[in-house]
Image: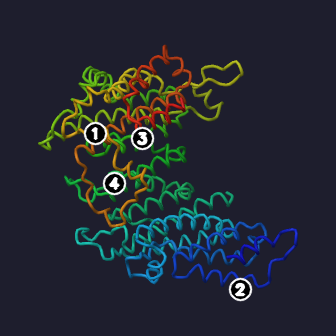
């Protein structure tokens, strides 16, 4: 490593040192250290590799072009998460027992090691982009043709993979390498049918691959709907249809992954997906018929995807009509007499969500859960619309579409957002609801919490672990159903409502602009709702409040 550092410092410097004739021998010897069984020793070479690949002179040498391809092939092996100190399934294990105290230490190291390798691969891809793509293609073709190996999975896994199964760690390595290469490839260069897996961990990797390879699909439009709607179908992925058991963590990850991919495609390539807007809208409406089929976050993801595509209408009136139709169910519920009294009164709200009840019968909890989900859906939908609805970036397109309503004294255009009317109609109840949320922390309302939900306002366990830097256990928990207690569900509900309500206000300024800031008595309304009773609001709730409202 020291020799490599000297080489980088001297070659191309004022000393006028030439590239050594025996550079190939040094690089081959250095590559040998990168393939050593010790993971720690491998990681020690990365800084030098990065320096060499970034070097203005060395990176152009033919030796480096050949060596970068060899390095990327080596990286494919090094990215496979093996060598746990507690295991004996790889030569690296023996070295790991010397280098690391426990599996948790190894996991922490490997995550950093993996990120470093990704950065070096991106540098190597700049030197040999076509070779990088060829290596990625070969690895991908090999992986999709290889049989699924679940390894020593426990009996309760029913033959499915766990997070440490051989197939999963190999898919994860291949997926990470593919993402690193493809992302860099489109920056460097100018302008098969995948298996339908029912294993959630493998399917998650396939979704990552679809997302990484999606730019290539744009040149083959006949494949675009197949690829896009494969992601959409994964949003409703289940291991067992009709099962009453909670979804496992791996199943939740697949669905979350699919939502993110759909939003990403609609955000980055909306003009290509717009022809399939009606097909997507029909599917979304069918999914929304069953309230329990999707979680509120998944519904919000679908709403965001539709709104992103509607931005491509580039017609104010057409988009306004669509957004009003999309938000009609939410507007009807949010502005109803029943919900009005609940949103404006802390006592009624606590009763509606079941926070004042002692839960003994699970069916009672199911009813309260449905009430909570309906409020959450309203808030999530408002957030999704105000976050994503926009006018065209091009001024001429905005003018032609009816989005420009005037100009400032300096000549800057004044835009109007097509979501203005439905969102502004919902703001009074939202502000009242935010006042209600702050009022929940008043002593008399805290006292109304039942014994079952006495901890409902406390910090979520996941946030505690994040603050304390407590990592997830390395044991296989992905195949275990995620059972949440009644209080955990209510904690998550309160936390999400509080944060998302402030996010709506935070995004409203950017989205609605003058239509938001010219609301009559806006300052007084914000102070009397978002900032009321702050002396009673706990610190862990004030942090997101300050962070979000700072952007208004």
Residue lying at the far left in this picture: please name it. Answer: 361
Judging from the image, what secondary structure is the residue with disc 3 in? helix
Q: Which residue is mark 3?
A: 278
Q: Note whether residue 196 is visible.
A: no
Q: CA distance from mark 1 to mark 4?
A: 23 Å
Whichever of labels 2 and 3 marks the residue nearer the N terminus, that label is 2
Mark 3 neighbour density, 10 Å: few (under 14) some (14–19) many (20 or more): few
Foreground tag (1 vs 2): 1
Give me the residue at 33% from left, 65% from top. 199
Foreground tag (2 vs 3): 2
Task: Decide which of 284, 115 is in the foreground and name it.
Answer: 115
Judging from the image, what secondary structure is the residue with disc 4 in? helix
Whichever of labels 1 and 3 marks the residue nearer the N terminus, that label is 3
Task: Decide which of 490, 418 is in the foreground and name it.
Answer: 490
| Residue 359 place in picture, x, y as percent | 15, 40
| Residue 366 place in picture, x, y as percent | 19, 41
| Residue 338 place in picture, x, y as percent | 24, 22
Quadrant into which the N terminus falls: bottom right
Mark 2 neighbour density, 10 Å: few (under 14) some (14–19) many (20 or more): few
Q: Which residue is mark 4?
A: 252
Q: CA distance from mark 1 to mark 3?
A: 42 Å
Task: Kindly indicate whether the residue at mark 2 contacts the one at mark 1 (C-beta within 8 angstroms).
Answer: no
| Residue 400 place in picture, x, y as percent | 61, 27
Foreground tag (3 vs 4): 4
Residue 362 is left or right of residue 409, and the answer is left
* Marker disc for residue 25: 2
């Amino acid at each position: 490593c020291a020799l490599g550092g000297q080489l980088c410092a001297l070659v191309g410097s004022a000393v006028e040192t030439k590239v050594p004739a025996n550079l190939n021998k040094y690089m081959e010897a250095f590559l040998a250290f990168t393939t050593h069984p010790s993971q720690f020793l491998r990681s020690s070479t990365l800084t030098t590799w990065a320096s060499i690949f970034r070097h203005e002179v060395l990176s152009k040498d033919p030796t480096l072009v050949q060596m970068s391809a060899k390095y990327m092939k080596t990286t494919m092996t090094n990215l496979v998460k093996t060598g746990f100190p507690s295991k004996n399934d790889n030569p690296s294990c023996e070295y790991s027992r010397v280098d690391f105290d426990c599996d948790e230490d190894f996991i922490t190291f490997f995550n950093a090691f993996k990120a470093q390798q990704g950065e070096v691969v991106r540098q190597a891809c700049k030197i040999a982009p076509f070779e990088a793509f060829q290596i990625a293609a070969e690895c991908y073709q090999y992986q999709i043709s290889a049989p699924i190996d679940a390894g020593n999975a426990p009996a309760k896994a029913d033959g499915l993979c766990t997070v440490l199964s051989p197939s999963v760690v190999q898919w994860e390595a291949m997926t990470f390498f593919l993402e690193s290469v493809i992302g860099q490839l489109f920056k460097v260069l100018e302008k098969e049918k995948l298996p339908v897996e029912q294993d959630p961990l493998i399917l998650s990797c396939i979704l990552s691959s679809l997302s990484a390879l999606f730019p290539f699909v744009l040149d083959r439009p006949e494949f675009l709907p197949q690829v896009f709607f494969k992601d959409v179908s994964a949003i409703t992925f289940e291991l067992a249809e009709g099962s009453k058991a909670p979804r496992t963590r791996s199943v939740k990850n697949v669905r979350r992954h699919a939502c993110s991919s759909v939003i990403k495609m609609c955000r980055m390539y909306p003009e290509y997906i717009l022809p399939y807007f009606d097909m997507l809208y029909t599917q979304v409406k069918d999914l929304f018929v069953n309230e329990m089929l999707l979680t509120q976050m998944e519904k919000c993801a679908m709403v965001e995807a539709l709104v992103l595509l509607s931005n491509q209408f580039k017609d104010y009136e057409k988009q306004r009509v669509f957004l009003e139709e999309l938000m009609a169910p939410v507007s009807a519920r949010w502005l109803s007499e029943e919900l009005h009294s609940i949103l404006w009164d802390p006592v009624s709200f606590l009763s509606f969500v079941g926070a004042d009840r002692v839960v003994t019968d699970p069916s009672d909890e199911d009813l309260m859960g449905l009430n909570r989900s309906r409020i959450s859906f309203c808030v999530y939908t408002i957030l999704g619309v105000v976050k994503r609805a926009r006018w065209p970036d091009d001024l001429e397109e905005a003018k032609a579409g009816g989005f420009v309503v005037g100009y400032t004294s300096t000549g800057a255009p004044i835009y109007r957002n097509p979501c203005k009317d439905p969102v502004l109609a919902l703001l009074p109840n939202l502000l009242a609801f935010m006042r209600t949320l702050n009022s929940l922390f008043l002593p008399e309302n805290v006292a109304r919490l039942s014994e079952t939900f006495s901890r409902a306002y406390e910090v979520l366990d996941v946030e505690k672990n994040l603050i304390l830097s407590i990592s997830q256990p390395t044991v296989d928990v992905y195949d275990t159903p995620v059972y949440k207690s009644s209080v955990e569900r209510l904690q998550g509900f309160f936390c999400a409502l509080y944060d998302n309500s402030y996010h709506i206000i935070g995004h409203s300024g950017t989205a609605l602009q003058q239509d938001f800031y010219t609301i009559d008595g806006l300052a007084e309304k914000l102070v009397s709702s978002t900032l009321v009773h702050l002396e009673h609001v706990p610190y862990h709730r004030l942090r997101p409040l300050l962070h979000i409202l700072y952007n208004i």
